Amino acid sequence: MIKQNIGILLVNLGTPDAPTPQAIKPYLSEFLSDRHVVDVSPIIWWPLLRFIIIPKRIKHITQRYASIWTEQGSPLLKYSRSLCEKLSQKYPDKQIELAMTYGNPDLQQALEKLKQCDVIKVLPLYPQFSTTTTDAVIDKVKALTTTWSQKPEFEFVRDYADHIAYINGLCQHIEQAFTLHGKPDTLLFSYHGIPESYIRDRKDNYVDRCELTTLLVNSALQAKGVQVDVQMSYQSRFGKAKWVEPDTTPTLIELAKQGKQHIQVICPGFAVDCIETLDEIDELNRQEFLQAGGKQFYYIPALNDSPEQVSLMAELLNL
Ligand SMILES: C=CC1=C(C)c2cc3[nH]c(cc4nc(cc5[nH]c(cc1n2)c(C)c5CCC(=O)O)C(CCC(=O)O)=C4C)c(C)c3C=C
Ligand SMILES: [Fe+2]
Ligand SMILES: [Fe+2]
């Protein structure tokens, strides 16, 4: 059999190069101009984005990024990079590159580095498929390589919402959190939301995939004898359109009002921690819960660059 030269490409969403308005503006413009993300005609959307939405959002979002920034940059980049490095160390015979759909490391440059491969396996770092994220990666990879005369074979990992190594990895991290902090009154699974119309108009099955992850993790916990009240919600709502429900913040406030004193939150839709988990959940939603009368709030970190995550990626890529 001829030995194939296999290249690996991990793709995450993207993040600004610095916690400054100068770096955040072009990143947000690129990201929010993609019709996979916001499905509005550019004639209407572009002036709104440029003259109203970004100017209105920039001061607040710069402060939020600054509060989570690390010496190695944005947490999303830090963890994605570390994951890629650990995978490269474990599989030194494979060429493994990291890219972002928006911003840096640049997707086109990463693809150029893998151009000589026979096969490029693309792993979008989204456990649950969505047209807003996974399809954005797949379509951009295809668009950037249409003109290549000698094209490698592309293999895309569409989704791993129900993969056993992912479910077990989440379970393990939940059990560690319970050992550390005790069992909570409620374990909340908070996923990034999407506009509700995308389910109908694009046949986006993201919500089904999120529900499946929650069900499988809960079943796996029960099979280990861990009984806990599990609830599910959607976070990071953006704009005026109707998004999928229930929303995370009112869910946490309601739980506090019901007398649930101890809550732990896990965000299984995020492969690595980022502004939406470290700031929106662990800072802003923590405050909402405590102000509503809650007593203990713990955010369970994403799988990040843990050994469980490295093994999961290796299984997904058949390494
Ligand atoms: C219409 C807007 C948005 C949709 C749809 C959307 C879907 C979506 N996003 C993620 C994962 C991430 N989103 C992140 C940040 C982020 N997302 C939006 C908007 C939409 N996302 C904005 C405006 C931002 C920037 C931050 C903010 O202003 O709140 C990130 C983190 C990036 C970082 O730098 O840390 C991730 C990751 C998923 C999984 C998803 C749909 C399934
Ligand atoms: Fe998002
Ligand atoms: Fe957000």
Image (cartoon, grey):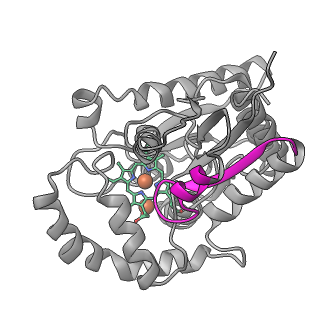
Image quarter where the N terminus lies is: top right
Q: Is residue 40 left or right of residue 163?
A: left
The answer to if 195 sits in the magenta stretch is no
Instruction: Answer with the quarter of the image where residue 294 lies.
Output: bottom right
Ligand 1: quadrant of the figure: bottom left
- Name the foreground residue: 212 vs 143: 143
Q: Is residue 300 left or right of residue 16?
A: right
- Name the foreground residue: 300 vs 163: 163
The answer to if 104 sits in the magenta stretch is yes
* Vertical side of 151 occupied by 47: above or below: below
Q: What residue range appears in magenta? A: 92-112
Residue 197 at x, y percent in the picture: 23, 36
* Vertical side of 313 occupied by 81: above or below: below
Q: Is residue 277 left or right of residue 251?
A: right
Residue 114 at x, y percent in the picture: 65, 47
* Vertical side of 268 occupied by 61: above or below: below
Instruction: Answer with the quarter of the image where residue 207 lies.
Output: top left
Q: Is residue 43 left or right of residue 173?
A: left
Q: Residue placed at 38% from the left, 60% from the top?
A: 31
Residue 255 at x, y percent in the picture: 48, 46
Q: Residue placed at 70% from the left, 26% from the top?
A: 227
